[in-house]
Image (cartoon, grey):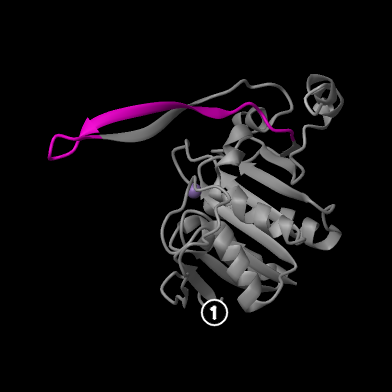
Amino acid sequence: MRILVSNDDGIFSPGIKALGLAMRALGEVFVVAPDMEQSAVGHGITVRRPLRFKHTQSAGFGEIPAYRVDGTPADCVVLGVHLLGRPDLVVSGINLGVNLGLDLTHSGTVAAALEGASLGIPSIAFSLDTSGEVLDFQEAARWALAIARAVGERGLPPGVLLNVNFPASKPKGLRVTRLSTHRFEDQVVERLDPEGKPYYWIAGTPAGEEEEGTDLWAVRRGYVSVTPVSLDLTAHGFLEALSGLLEGVAS
Ligand code: MN
């Protein structure tokens, strides 16, 4: 099996190192990751400037071929597949911090898996709750390997990827979950630059309800959360009502 490993924290992150090294147990691994942190860039693709694809020996992957790209996580998957050949599996992470609920709309970690899934390759995003006292990437990587092995052997339905979150402490087990309403409530901080002109910093505080069966609920209770995510963003439940809402618009 050939496994493409990417992330959004950058190629020098301890999370991608743990994930990449763990994946060696499944077959041939190659790493293609951003040269700098790209958290919260979402599924952006760089189309207005050229990209560089550079072999990187200093990221601690040993014999694993590793490349850094001056672009987004989705760029890394596009270039990795194009230049190194189609993998059997795309894995992204392990992100420093959870990606739950509405975080998926801006997560670069999840975007790498979205790009893999949109290319028809089984894909998984991995994120670790970093609110604990110790960051145990080794424990998370062991779970990531077990999940990736199952997906590699059994596949995923077309257009479906997995979003996996690890709890802050040693996992009690695994839960299949749905997305929560977890989100960041935007705060805009205004400060002054050295010339006295204002600049703005978008920050946010996490919010969301801990409903049973959701990703937030599982991670808060110490379980590995595995959510199937669909590339189909259609609001199927609203299709019929929308026809009613738009009645008369075309006439
Ligand atoms: Mn990140």
Give the vertical position of 110 relative to 221 (above or below).
below
Asked whether residue 204 is in view, the answer is yes
Any magenta on residue 230? no
Query: Quarter of the image containing the N terminus?
Result: bottom right
- What are the residue bounds of the magenta stretch? 177-198
Please provide percent x and percent y for residue 32.
55, 68
- Using the rendered view, name the quadrant where residue 57 is placed: bottom left
Q: Position of residue 52 (x, y in %)?
A: 46, 73
Can residue 143 be seen from the camera position used here? no
| Mark 1: secondary structure | loop
- Image quadrant in which you'd find residue 232: top right
Q: Residue at x 74, y 39 (%)?
A: 233
Residue 245 sits above or below residue 51 on the image: above
Residue, far front: 251
Label 1 residue near ligand 1, CB within 8 Å: no
Instruction: Name the residue: 14% across, 34% down.
Output: 196
Q: Horizontally, is 91 left or right of 31 in the view?
A: right
Residue 221 higher or lower than 13, as above or below: above
Residue 217's spot in the image, x, y percent? Answer: 65, 27
Mark 1 sits on what residue? 63
Residue 188 lies in the magenta stretch:
yes
Of residues 70 and 166, the one drawn nearer to the viewer in this rendering: 70
